[in-house]
Image (cartoon, grey):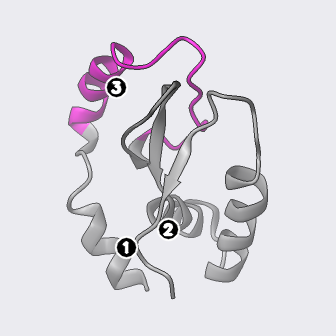
Amino acid sequence: MIDVIKEKKKKLIKANELPKWLEYIQEWLPEGAMKVDGFDDCICGIVERFGMDAVLLYDSDTMIEKMMSQDGMEYDDAVEYFEFNIKGAWMGEGTPCFFRDSFL
């Protein structure tokens, strides 16, 4: 699982490019779009939906890996925290979306 996450990180925006990219996407997002605090480096795009405002798209696996490396969580604990406290937190129409391409 960790190898899958590390491979995906290579495709994400590099840290030195992040501020410029975040500034760019602000033009596309409505005022009510929300961010997940501390996970700007896990943003992988914007989701546009018919008849609804655009929202941020986060890479779930990268968020989980970040909790493991920075907070010292075990994989199962990080997944549980993510599922309940991040993905499970409905904050209104501006709530971000979460992308996951590994289901191990």
Q: Earlier in the sequence, mark 1 or mark 3?
A: 1
Q: Image check: 23 left or right of 58?
A: left
For disc 3, the marked residue is: 22
Query: Which region of the structure is painted magenta?
Result: 16-40
**80 in the magenta segment:** no
In the rendered structure, are the residues bearing label 2 and label 3 in contact, judged by CB atoms less than 8 Å apart? no
Residue displayed at 69% across by 51% down: 86
For disc 1, the marked residue is: 5
In the image, residue 27 lies at what x, y percent? Answer: 33, 13
Q: Residues within 10 Å of mark 1 (few under 14, many from 20)?
A: some
The residues bearing labels 1 and 3 have C-alpha atoms spaced at a distance of 22 Å
Q: Which mark is residue 65?
A: 2
Up-down relation of residue 24 to residue 88 (above or below): above
* Quarter of the rendering occupied by the N terminus: bottom left
Residue displayed at 67% across by 54% down: 87
The residues bearing labels 2 and 3 have C-alpha atoms spaced at a distance of 21 Å
Q: Image check: 102 left or right of 12?
A: right
Q: Residues within 10 Å of mark 3 (few under 14, many from 20)?
A: some
In the rendered structure, are the residues bearing label 1 and label 2 in contact, judged by CB atoms less than 8 Å apart? yes
In the image, residue 83 lies at what x, y percent? Answer: 71, 63
Task: State the SS at label 1.
Answer: helix
* Residue type marked 3: Leu
* Residue type marked 2: Glu
Residue displayed at 31% across by 73% down: 6
